[in-house]
Image (tube, rainbow, N blue to C red):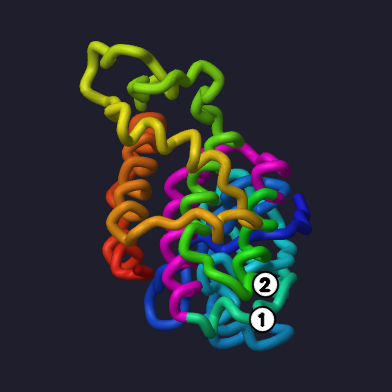
Amino acid sequence: MLIKTQAIVLRTHKYGESQLIIDLLTKSMGCVTFIQHVQQSTKKRIGIPFFQPLTLLEIEYDHRRNSQLQHFKDISVAYPFKTLPFDPYKVSIALFSAEFLYNCVRREPSDEALFDFILNSVRWLDMSSGSCSNFHLVLMLHLSRFIGFYPNLDDYRQDDFFDLRNGVFCPMPPSHSEYIVPEEASKIRLLMRMTYESMSLFHFSRHERNRCVRLIIDYYRLHIPSFPEMNSLSVLETLFQ
């Protein structure tokens, strides 16, 4: 079956001397894994820059259901980045975001709304000229809308605990240990108000931001089986003041 679709690069690793294994989130088929020679193709030279984290592509391939590795028939950059590859802060955020997204969506069925949310997020990061220090917080929190465990904010009352396992606020600690105490739980509603457009108005210290990231990862880890340790987290935690 011939597929032509938009795609976002989530993960790449070398295979042998001249090949890459590339995990893409596609608009039509969800996550798909490809193998590609990076020296050249029959039509044009294809190099590693095509497969940097969060690169936006247009691809065409013959989808083979019984094959774990697909092969490109055609590939092009759908949106040439203007700033992202040249800004070290944005590069670090892109590395973390791509790793986080891969861990979250690799088993999700194809979902055009999910794809469009990520696509628009990547383009916003590239086009942003202001502070992007809270970008990954917005991405992580709002991604939960699309994969089924967006926190229930309706029942919040002052001094509530937040039950990470069930995604709800509660007046007493739950019977299990996966919860957030009221002081930190009160910040969840504040965080959920952030958008890409408004996030520069929210000021966090490096410690506060890193604490938020770890709590969000804990939340995802409870809802996604086998969610691994984040290799890029240590780099991200050194950014911004």
Q: Nearer the viewer, residue 50 or 89?
A: 89
Which residue occupies 38% across, 15% down?
A: 170
- Check if residue 93 falls in the magenta segment: yes
Residue 38 image position (x, y, % from top left): 54, 81
Residue 201 image position (x, y, % from top left): 55, 57
Direction from residue 136 to residue 82 in the image, left or right: right
- Please give the label number shown on residue 127: 2
129 versus 72 height, above or below: below
Q: Nearer the viewer, residue 48 or 177?
A: 177
Q: Is residue 163 visible?
A: no
215 versus 14 height, above or below: above
219 versus 164 height, above or below: below
Contact check, label 1 and label 2, Cβ < 8 Å: yes
Question: Does label 1 or label 2 sit earlier along the sequence?
Answer: 1
Q: Mark 1 or mark 2, which is nearer to you?
A: 2
Residue 96 image position (x, y, % from top left): 42, 61
Q: Residues within 10 Å of mark 1 (few under 14, many from 20)?
A: few
Q: Amino acid at mark 1?
A: Lys
Q: Nearer the viewer, residue 215 or 171?
A: 171
The Cα–Cα distance between marks 1 and 2, rounded to whole angstroms, is 7 Å
Mark 1 — residue?
A: 82
- Check if residue 14 falls in the magenta segment: no
- Region rendered in magenta: 88-116
Q: Mark 1: which secondary structure?
A: loop
Q: Amino acid at mark 2?
A: Met
Which residue occupies 62% across, 46% down?
A: 30
Residue 87 image position (x, y, % from top left): 51, 81
